[in-house]
Amino acid sequence: MADDPAEFADVLEANRSYAESFELAGLPAVAGEGLAIVTCMDSRIEPLEMLGLEPGDAKIIRNAGARVTPDVLRTLVLATHALGVGRVMVVAHTRCKMASATQEEVEQLIAEQSGIDARSLDFHLITDQRSTLDRDVQAIRSWPFLPAGLPVGGFVYDVDTGRLETVVAPS
């Protein structure tokens, strides 16, 4: 085994401690509660804890802004047909950078931080969080590779209170 790279020494040491008391061996790959959660990568969101779930209960799909992209749809096809998912929550959140910045601001930030020209990337930024959530839920509901009648709802998580608000009622 190679020495731990210095950049990751802290988390690899934490992993060794975690592994010493690891209790999830043998957990089935299917979603125990039949749930998939599409949410943001924001580290203030704890998807399992906020819903009273445990490891193994749900499939969690994360990206910047909780957007329903082609990759999310592809992942949901696998989750619904092979991994026990029978309902989907799309969970956006308050104070999301993807819902408060413009494409130009993100491009400028990246250029200033790293000197990289990111103008060719679409960051799927959000100008109206509620209407975007509605469109993203509809994208799942209308995807022909997902089961007909799959319950899908759209929610906003408040990062300051921990509460969820229903924005798009489950179908």
Image: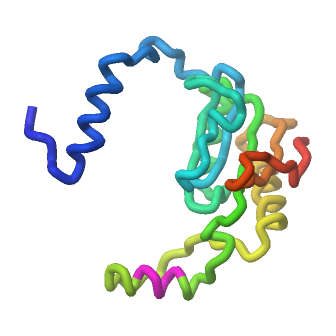
> Relative to residue 73, is residue 127 depicted above or below?
below
Comparing 13 with 113, the one in front is 13
**Residue at the location (39% across, 85% down)?**
111
Relative image position of residue 137 (x, y in whole percent)? 79, 53
Residue 41 found in image quarter = bottom right
* Magenta-drawn stretch contains 14: no
Q: Nearer the viewer, residue 106 or 148?
A: 106
Q: Picture coordinates of residue 3 (x, y %)?
A: 9, 40
Residue 82, position as x, y percentages in the image = 61, 26
Quadrant (top left/top right/bottom left/bottom right) for the C terminus: top right
Q: Position of residue 105 (x, y in %)?
A: 55, 85
Residue for point 63% across, 30% down? 58
Residue at the outermost left position: 2
Give the camera-side residue of 47 and 35. Answer: 47
Quadrant of the frame with the N terminus: top left
* Residue 108 within the magenta-colored segment of the rendering: yes
Instruction: Report the side of 110 relative to 38 (left or right).
Output: left
Q: How is the image coloured?
A: rainbow
> In terms of secondary structure, what is the magenta stretch mainly?
helix
- Of all residues, the one furthest to the top in this rendering is 26
Q: Is residue 97 left or right of residue 91?
A: left
Residue pictured at 74% horizontal, 39% vertical: 88
Q: How many marks?
A: 0
In the picture, measured across the screen, residue 39 lies left or right of residue 15, that is right
Tell me which segment is drawn in magenta: 106-110
Q: Residue at x 82, y 64 (%)?
A: 130
